[in-house]
Amino acid sequence: MLDLKAVAADFETFERRLARRGEKAAQALAPVRPLAQQRRELYLLLEKQKKEQGEKNAHIREVAKTDRGAVEGARAALRALGDSVKKTETEIAQLEAEIERLLLLVPNPPHESVPDGVDERSNVVVRTWGEKRTLGFTPRPHWDLGEALGIFEWGQAAKLSGARFTISKGAGARLERAIAAFFLDVHTSRGYREILPPYLVTAETMTGTGQLPKFEEDAFKTTNTPPLYLIPTAEVPVTNMHRDEVFEANALPIWYCAWTPCFRAEAGSAGRDTRGIIRQHQFHKVELVKFTRAEESYAEHDKMMDDACEVLRRLELHHRVVLLCAGDMGFSAAKTYDVEVWCPGQDCYREISSVSNCEDFQARRIRVRYRGEGGKPRLAHTLNGSGVAVGRTVVAILEQYQEADGSVTVPEALRPYMGGMERIVPERFPRGVER
């Protein structure tokens, strides 16, 4: 969330910065401007009323010395003024609640180093690792491979849950488990502390990281009163762990990693990626979260991006890093790198991680601070990134490591996690007949 004082002091600058995200973002502050002016006028009125209160109190003390008969009239006037003060304070509180509601819908302005542009066509490739493997045959997409290998099942998943769900079986299920364990081992060896958070959170927790109120339609929630929300990413509970806390400056940075299921309604994605496991309502992901001092957050951002790439390097998966343009970034991000993995069966790169610096945008919502110069509390910066998406790593392995005979080679780094398995071959298990 933006700082109202800073916004009110220079609306034009914030509107100009937000305009880099697109027309809607440019207009997001428009309803705030008149309310901020009303707020300023009410505070001036309140200041005047309180000054008058002080003067009347002093007058009563003086009158009481010489004319006790006039005291009651003066006190009645003071009581009326007190009622006016309370009324003004109530109006300010109501106005500030409305301003906060509106500010919760305003995205984070992009960092100055973010390129201009409205969509992915303006993103900038900043580095590439590895080469596209020469297969010597026409590569198959992961959905064909998974079905032929007997490790993916969509029909049974649809019976259980409907569209956009998948059952992984046999070596497919083991591969997901192996990838998650491998990722966690790599990240914890590099300084991250592993967290296993709750998968259901409150509306306040979802609001703290920016999922609410803007993206209510993308969330799954229970019918409790109040409802609980299924997490769309471990970023939500892990970032909120330190809500309302103040750190000593030397306690930061803090690095966390967490493996969780993620649940997303995928509102607005009808017709996109309907085949395979690219866009599912439920998937697994290892998430990286950092809390840093303001002056260190961009150095930590680059480190986090490299940590996300490290697991792909160890799996020897060809990938690239893309700096997102202003119009393609997520709501809470000031700057984002996407890591995209090559999928030869689809003849394209697929996002496998987004690594974002949110600066103090989330920290202002959840009130996470640290003691800066002179011990004065200062808002921390929060960072998050996939380290990385497990299901999409399965996709990349199947497509990059596929062989001409339909089998898939297991990356060497994963073999200890797969019980020494070197190759995934077709699995045949008995099943019933649909009637």
Image (cartoon, rainbow, N blue to C red):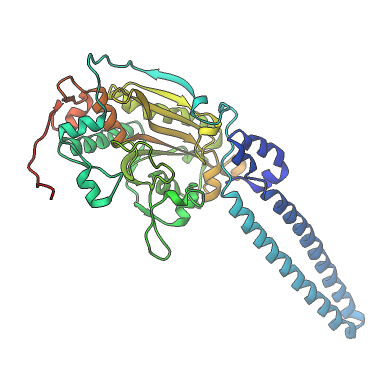
Residue 354 versus residue 296: which sits nearer the camera?
A: 354
Residue 346 versus residue 91: which sits nearer the camera?
A: 346
Image location (x, y in percent) of residue 163:
30, 46
Image location (x, y in percent) of residue 220:
38, 53
Quarter of the image for residue 371 reads top right
Look at 19% across and 36% down and name the residue there. Answer: 172
Q: Is residue 297 visible?
A: no
Say left or right for 78 vs 403: right
Residue 311 versus residue 23: which sits nearer the camera?
A: 23
Look at 82% across and 72% down and name the residue there. Answer: 57
Image location (x, y in percent) of residue 95:
67, 59
Count of labels shown? 0
Quarter of the image for residue 376 reads top right
Q: Is residue 301 visible?
A: yes
Q: Residue furthest left?
A: 430
Say left or right for 284 vs 354: left
Residue 406 versus residue 288: which sits nearer the camera?
A: 406
Image location (x, y in percent) of residue 112:
60, 29
Say left or right for 394 vs 91: left
Look at 54% across and 33% down and name the residue there. Answer: 327
Q: Residue furthest bottom?
A: 69
Up-down: is 221 above or below 118?
below
